[in-house]
Image (spheres, rainbow, N blue to C red):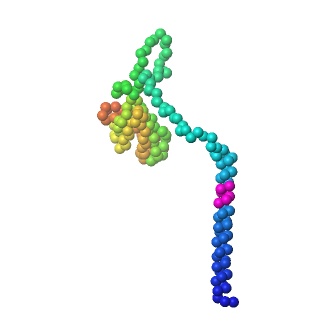
Amino acid sequence: MSESEPDQDRQQQIIAAVVKVVGVALAIGLAIGLGTWILVKALGLDSTDTTGQPIQVDPITPSALPTTALPDPTQSSDPTETESPSEPSFTSSPGDEKLLLSASPLFVDPMQRINLTGQWPGRDAVPLLVQRFEDGEWVNFGVQVQVTVGTFDTYVLTGREGDNKFRVFDPETETASNAVSVTVGD
């Protein structure tokens, strides 16, 4: 046996391995191609009966916004009364609507989140201060919230146990909301 025979055996093994890899790759490619062709035929994606014309899409024109507000369901609907259409609430003059606040949950552990949400209809981009009732007076709590399209929401954390009363206050108009009471601890 000469030295060239092991080299030839090695070379034949390499060629055989390359042929096997190419054969496996070819088989996988054929399987994927055949599967894709069957799927296209089954779904009918190969149809060429289109005219090639672009599809015409008509733009949607937005409708006008309403100019009158819905009637208040709490008011009586006496058919003898004739009411003129009222202005929408977003154009109401300042001071027409009350600043309302609610809190949840009403019973929390110390340093548990207290969600404060509210409404001030007809207001937008108005900063409000959160205040807590301490020693007989309202004190700024260090949280500010912004009214966005008549609504606002924020949260506070407190470790002061017992009943805590909160409100929001607009320093510009000196308007305060209703007070909400949250029991902390106990």
Question: What is the tally of numbered marks visible in this picture?
Answer: 0
Q: Is residue 102 above or below residue 64?
A: below
Q: Residue furthest top?
A: 80
Residue at the (42%, 45%) spot, across then down: 158
Residue furthest out toward the left = 172
Q: Position of residue 19 (x, y in %)?
A: 66, 70
Residue 33: image x %, image y %?
Answer: 65, 56
For the residue pair 14 and 61, the one nearer the viewer reads as 14
Front-most of 178 and 64?
64
For the N terminus, give its image quadrant: bottom right
User: Could you tell me which residue is drawn at 65 percent across and 57 percent down?
Assistant: 32
Q: Nearer the viewer, residue 36 or 104?
A: 36
The vertical placement of 73 against 35, above or below, is above
* SS majority, magenta: helix
Q: Residue at x 38, y 38 (%)?
A: 146
Judged left or right of residue 63, residue 92 is left
Q: Which residues are magenta?
A: 29-34
Question: Residue 69's image quarter?
Answer: top left
Which residue sits at x=66%, y=89%?
2
Image spot of residue 140 (x, y percent): 34, 41
Residue 106 included in the magenta stretch of the image: no
In the rendered view, tell whether residue 3 sits above or below residue 124. below
Asked if 32 appears above or below 75 in the picture, the reply is below
Say which of 44 and 81 sits in front.
44
Q: Position of residue 61 (x, y in %)?
A: 46, 30
For residue 180, say whether it is visible: no
